[in-house]
Amino acid sequence: MRNEAKECPKCGCTHIGYGKQSGNGNVSANGKLSLGSAIMHVICTDCGYVIESYATRPKSFKGTLRS
């Protein structure tokens, strides 16, 4: 599921890292009781630019309401 970023679009660095935001940083589905999902981030290790973010459990957002 992870798209492999080869280069930072901001600074051109090719050193890319991955991080997981979880715990109190979980994203919960709007209008739905669920545990939510941790968020994964693809980050440039040179300038800190967040290249990409995605939910680790996208199915927990199916059928949710828009605000």
Image (tube, helix red, strand yellow):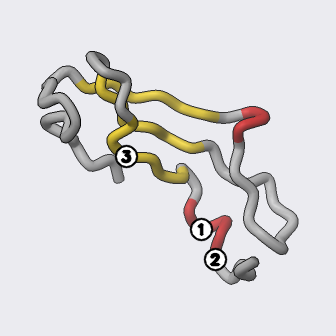
**Which residue is disc 2 drawn over?**
62
| Residue at image point 20% right, 21% down | 15
| Residue at image point 75% right, 57% down | 28
Q: Secondary structure at mark 3?
A: strand
Q: Secondary structure at mark 2?
A: loop
**Nearer to me, 66 or 58:** 66
**Which residue is disc 3 drawn over?**
52
- The amino acid type of the residue labelled 1 equals Lys
Residues at marks 2 and 1 touching, judged by CB atoms closer than 8 Å: yes
Q: Is residue 41 above or below residue 61?
A: above
Q: Position of residue 36 (x, y in %)?
A: 73, 54
Residue 42 is labelled as none
- The amino acid type of the residue labelled 3 equals Glu
Label 2 packing within 10 angstroms: few (<14), some (14-19), many (20+): few
Q: Along the polypeptide, which appears first: circle 3 or circle 1?
A: 3
The alpha-carbon separation of the residues under discs 3 and 1 comes to 19 Å
**Which residue is disc 1 drawn over?**
59
- The amino acid type of the residue labelled 2 equals Lys
Q: Secondary structure at mark 1?
A: helix
